[in-house]
Every structure is written in structure tokens, then in C-alpha cells.
Amino acid sequence: MAINYRPLDRNESNIYRGIRLESLKEFPDAFSATYEETSRIEKLSMEYSIENGTAEKFVLGAFDNSELIGISTFVKDENGIGNIYQMYIQKKYQGQNIGFGLLGNILKEAKKRFGEVTVSLEVSIKNSSAINLYKKAGFTIEASSHGSNTLVMTNKKI
Ligand SMILES: CC(C)(COP(=O)(O)OP(=O)(O)OC[C@H]1O[C@@H](n2cnc3c(N)ncnc32)[C@H](O)[C@@H]1OP(=O)(O)O)[C@@H](O)C(=O)NCCC(=O)NCCS
């Protein structure tokens, strides 16, 4: 199986929306947004960013041939910190090192665009698969937030 990783193009906001909603439906505990609320939003903020080609906000996709099977979103904030959100690999593709590949490629893309940047993300304290993945990619636990249900993890100056 040949998996390719690349940022989504301006004309791919529709496939982003599809897989984002799928991730919320399939893994309701992994994200702070809900499927019900998100599906009611006519156009998601990230759909606009994809269509506008905003450099500071992009979605990296994992593709099996031409099919989008995983996503991760990168947002560089006003403090110059990079934030990773919405990490998702479709169920049948999980456990095959694709999440690790996607994370490595989104960090590489961020470095290409912005140079060295500190990257932060939040993860539920119960989501051990994701916590292990982030640790493997060099992230360390910085703090807990939201009544300690969430860990903040950072990867300093990638
Ligand atoms: C978390 C997620 C992105 C991982 O993607 P994946 O492609 O399955 O992960 P990989 O196969 O690349 O695994 C990389 C590392 O992650 C960790 N990991 C992945 N699945 C795991 C599991 N079921 N149990 C424990 N650790 C796991 C391991 O450290 C693994 O490295 P190893 O194989 O050397 O042990 C994927 O499971 C997913 O989409 N989950 C649902 C949504 C979600 O939780 N998103 C994260 C929100 S913060």
C-alpha cells in the first residue's frame, strides 16, 4: 500500500468536510467538537482556509492512491505557535504507521513554511493511542487543562 501525504488543494474543501464529519461521528470522545453541531455549520472555518489557500492554516491529508484516508490540521496562531488539531486516520487504516507518517509530514510542511516553530496540541487524557503517537513523534506533556481531562503536549522548535 502506497500512502502519500500532501496539503489539500483549494478545490478539496468538500473532501475535507466529509472526512472531518466522519471522524466526529466515529470517534466522538476524541474531539471537543460534536458531529451534530458541526454538521449543522454550512461551511466550516477550515473549508474557507482551504479554499483561500491560507498559508497559516492548512490541512495535511494522507491518501491511499487518490482517496483521502486521514487528516491533520495545522494553524499558526498570532503568537507564532503552531497548533495541530483534528488528527484522524480512518479505522481500517489505523495501526499501520500512517498516523505517525501524517504527523511527521505535517511537521515537515510547517518547517518548510515557517522555519523553526514550537508546536502544541491537546489530547484527551483517556486517548492513550494518540498520546503514544505524539510521544513517539517527540512531543512531551506540558500541562493539563479543562479540569485535567485534557493534556497539552508540545514539540519545541521542530
Ligand atoms: C490516534 C490515531 C491518529 C493514530 O493513528 P494510527 O495511524 O493508528 O497510528 P500509527 O499506526 O501511526 O501508530 C503510531 C504510534 O501511535 C501509538 N498507537 C497507535 N495506535 C495505538 C493503540 N491502539 N494503542 C496504543 N498505542 C497506539 C503507538 O505509539 C504507535 O507506535 P508503535 O506502532 O511503534 O507502537 C488514530 O488511532 C485515530 O485516528 N484515532 C481516532 C481519532 C483520534 O483519537 N485522534 C486524535 C485526537 S487528539
Image (cartoon, grey):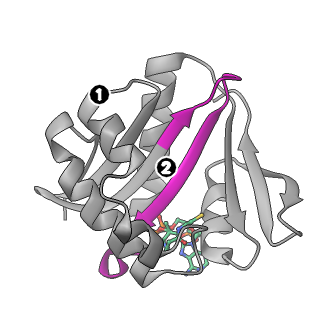
Give the amino acid type for the residue marked by disc 1 in the picture. Gly
In percent of width and height, residue 46 lies at: 39, 45
Among the two numbered marks 1 and 2 on one chain, the one whose residue lies closer to the N terminus: 1
Q: Nearer the viewer, residue 62 or 34?
A: 34
Q: Is mark 1 within 8 Å of ligand 1?
A: no
Distance, label 1 to label 2, CA atoms, is 20 Å
**Magenta extent:** 74-95
Relative to 120, 98 lies left or right: left
What's the mark number on residue 2? none
Examine the rendering and report whether any part of residue 95 can be seen: no
Look at mark 1 in the image and give the residue it sits on: 53
In percent of width and height, residue 139 lies at: 71, 48
Q: Nearer the viewer, residue 74 or 14?
A: 14
Q: How many marks?
A: 2
Q: Residue at left 37%, top 52%?
A: 44
Look at mark 2 in the image and give the residue it sits on: 103
Quarter of the image where one finds residue 14: bottom left
Relative to 31, 70 lies left or right: left
Q: Nearer the viewer, residue 19 or 62?
A: 19
Quarter of the image where one finds residue 40: bottom left
145 lies above or below 81 = below
In percent of width and height, residue 51 lies at: 24, 35
The C terminus, quarter of image: top right
Q: Residue furthest left?
A: 66
Q: Is residue 56 within the magenta segment? A: no
